Amino acid sequence: MRRLTPLPPQRAADLVGRYAAERAGARRRFLIGLAVMAVLVVLAGYAAEVRPLVLAANIGKFTAYLGQIVPVLRPAHLGEDVAEWYWGLPKWLKLLGETLLMAYLGTLLGAVGGFVLCFVAAGNLVRSAALRFAAKRYLEICRTVPEIVFALIFVIAFGLGPMVGVLALAIHTTGALGKLFSEVVENIDMKPVEGLTGTGASWVETVRFAVLPQVLSNFASYALLRFEINVRGAGVMGFVGAGGIGQELLIAIRNFYYSDVSAILLLIVLTVFAIDLGTEKLRHHLIGAEGTQ
Amino acid sequence: MTGRTPSSLRATALAELDVIRARHPEQFRTDIAGRLRLLAVLGAILGLAAYGMWALEFSLARILGGLGRLGGFALEMLPPSAGGRFGVFLHALAETLGIAFLGTLTAAILAFPVAFLAARNVVPNPFARFAVRRGLDVIRSVDVLIWALIWINVVGLGPFAGALAIACSDVGAFGKLFSEAIETCDRRPAEGVVASGGSALHRIRFGLIPGVLPVLASQVLYFFESNTRSATIIGIVGAGGIGQYLTELIRVLELQQVAFLVLMILVTVAVIDWVSGRLRRAIIGGAAR
């Protein structure tokens, strides 16, 4: 076995010095970062009117609120209590169904819009820079303006109701999915495209037979992911009068109908859970199907 | 070389179609089962869509009328103008950024320890992990606007409620993302720390944290970007920020000012995206070196 030979003292001292300097530098950088962060926190706290004392004084209210929305469930009268807690179940289930349909239609219409635009926005399929630029900017505007702002404007233009929520969700989804889709398209294998172009296929034929088979399962997976997000988004559309269960929740919270708040929240959480699980299964199935091909 | 153009290759192929068909029958067979399956899936998707449109009372007349009005709105939005309230809007924008920044930071600080509890390579006990994860999922599935409504009951109307709401809804998302980052982290540094006699805490501090910190930082920055967007809408329920003015102005149809506000938001979001994109690349690049 070889023995470890200690370094010559000069080199050892050198190394120790270098190490200490490195550590000191790292510490200095850390402290500077911390100071910058602290300044930003103070500035942001000033801008956002953070009042820790109010929070400390009222944090009891938060726990009390949570305590109040928890329904009274006595083991002896469990059936009656649950029935009383969920007194509005038929109405809520109908609204929940409406919410899910809104999310579905919004996702579907948005996916169709994103599907049409993504091929135009993809750099490897469209040579015209102006067309591509226009498509990309349009998608960006759709994506950056939150769906609830679209809903606010549409409610005035189209009137109250779930249709408005669907349109708002659809426009936002077009922007979000169009960007993701076009990124998928930009990453495809270009050989089939060249092959089809070589045989004289038109642009639409090239997209149909060379691009589509490569991207479809990814598109479906992204659309399902968006559906999950849209279920959450559709849940609050009612806050501005655009349909779904949000309106009931808003009324319950604003008017302090405590047990209704917990009942509706629980319904929403359970629905979101179920949808998340379902789409996750489907997405794994889709991606798995692609892997075996 | 006979200089064959693509079109003549196509013509040749079409002329010899029968020969080619006889030579490669399997390429020309119609996949009836596959087509039927596709038709069934498409039919189900479109059928549900049609039912949805019927159930949600879609009407062409309403859509056309609304589009007409929207066109009118678009004309009224021009030219965007602050209507002499630029200072007020700027203050609201600062409030929005403050909400997004504090909310994201608070959520990151709260989620950091929790994420270790939800990571498989830190807490081997599946039941504890399961409980933490489901708890995070529940927090995550409540929308930020709902959190805002709840916090308004506690601290009153204003931006502070908004910051708390963003912090709450992000704790769930961060907890999940952070724990996934910790689980996919390189095992070897942690094993090295344990092999040289480090305790469980040493393992986390010197074996895991240096590896995951850049990933977490870039996720936090990414969320800051998206929270700037959330913070612009949180004012709709009265939790501060620029959304309050946006809602008000849309309701009273001051469309020039609405257009101005939307432009302000778009520019701010673009600037934040650009800055945080640069920072994220710098952080990730630093980790790769």
Image: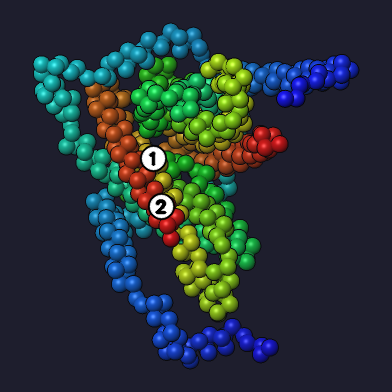
- Chain letter behind tag 2: A
The one nearer the camera, B228 or A17, is A17
Residue B193 lies, in percent from the top left, at 60, 22
At 31% from the left edge and 62% from the top edge, which residue is drawn? Answer: B42
Asked if labels 1 and 2 share a chain, the reply is: yes
Can you name the residue that lies furthest to the right here? Answer: A10
Quarter-wise, where is residue A280 in the image? Answer: top left
Q: Tag on residue A233?
A: 1
Image mark for residue A288: 2
Q: Quadrant of the N terminus of chain A?
A: top right
User: Distance of mark 1 from mark 2, alpha carbons?
Assistant: 29 Å
Please indicate whether residue A261 sits to the left or right of residue B117 in the image: left
- Disc 2 packing (10 Å; few <14; some 14–19; many ≥20): few
Does residue A48 show up? no
Q: In the visual, does A29 lie left or right of B232?
A: right
The secondary structure type at the circle numbered 2 is helix
When the figure is inspected, residue B192 is found, relative to residue B275, above or below; the finding is above
Residue farthest bottom in this picture: B15
